[in-house]
């Protein structure tokens, strides 16, 4: 049901996330819908809970499998490119008028940013700088979702890849270079 709800959001925004549209897409009756939910508001809450848990679970599961911090940064870029951007854009629009939705969106964004901060810290960037860099990365994602009706995934990937290049992430014989310099304890604890 989550995928159907995301598809409806992607196609027509929050106004398309109705009981009639859900039932039609799923091929079920409204009676079947009411057997699971008291109404569309209850469905919206359940949908948002499932969306948040899914984002958190997927991100943590994938990132925990990455071998090192540079791999995590690459993985986070690929995951950012792969999300259902049109649905997330609709959720962001919905969040501007609905405090409950805004709370779910805020938690998802905070989790994404925290994971990126940890990846940056893992390559030797101090925590304060890592927070700024993570916010810039999240801003690239959110900004792209907001300025494009249908996100061009190749363009987003190019933007995020350029962001990584600006940060100077590279490997040198197994050592990590950040900005072309091996991180030192002083840099890591600045």
Image (cartoon, rainbow, N blue to C red):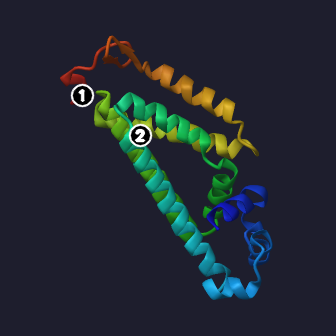
Quarter the C terminus occupies: top left
Indicate whether 80 appears above or below 183. Answer: below
Specify the farthest residue to the front. 27
Q: Position of residue 37 (x, y in %)?
A: 62, 84
| Helix, strand or loop at mark 1 | helix
Q: Position of residue 179 (x, y in %)?
A: 39, 17
Look at the image and tell me whether residue 37 can be seen. no
Indicate whether 164 appears above or below 56. Answer: above
Indicate whether 8 appears above or below 64. Answer: below
Looking at this view, is 61 or 155 the one in front?
61
Quarter the N terminus occupies: bottom right
Find residue 29 and report its image quarter.
Answer: bottom right
The answer to whether mark 2 and mark 1 are in CB contact below 8 A is: no
Residue at label 1?
188
Indicate whether 88 appears above or below 1. Answer: above
Residue visible at 76% across and 45% down?
149
Q: Which mark is residue 40?
A: none
Comes first in the chain, label 2 or label 1:
2
Looking at this view, is 125 or 177 the one in front?
177
Residue at label 2?
116
| Helix, strand or loop at mark 2 | helix
Label 2 crowd (10 A; few <14 / some 14-19 / many >=20): many
Select label 2 or label 1 by which is in front: 2
From the viewer's perspective, tell me whether residue 2 is left or right of residue 23. left
Residue visible at 47% across and 51% down?
58
Look at the image and tell me whether residue 6 can be seen. yes
Q: Measure how far apart labels 2 and 1 are at the Cα level.
A: 16 Å
Q: Position of residue 78 (x, y in %)?
A: 54, 36
């Amino acid at each position: 049901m989550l995928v159907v709800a995301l598809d409806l959001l992607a196609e027509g925004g929050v106004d398309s996330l109705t009981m009639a549209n859900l039932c039609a897409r799923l091929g079920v009756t409204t009676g079947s819908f009411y057997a699971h939910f008291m109404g569309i508001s209850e469905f919206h809450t359940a949908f948002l809970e499932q969306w948040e848990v899914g984002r958190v679970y997927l991100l943590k599961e994938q990132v925990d499998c990455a071998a090192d911090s540079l791999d995590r940064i690459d993985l986070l870029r690929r995951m950012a490119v792969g999300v259902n951007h049109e649905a997330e854009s609709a959720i962001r629009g919905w969040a501007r008028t609905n405090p409950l939705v805004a709370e779910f969106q805020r938690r998802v964004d905070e989790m994404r940013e925290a994971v990126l901060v940890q990846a940056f810290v893992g390559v030797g960037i101090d925590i304060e700088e890592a927070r700024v860099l993570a916010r810039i990365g999240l801003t690239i994602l959110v900004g792209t979702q907001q300025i494009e009706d249908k996100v061009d995934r190749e363009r987003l990937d190019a933007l995020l890849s350029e962001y990584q290049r600006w940060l100077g992430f590279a490997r040198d014989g197994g050592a990590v270079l950040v900005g072309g310099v091996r991180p030192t304890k002083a840099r890591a604890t600045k």
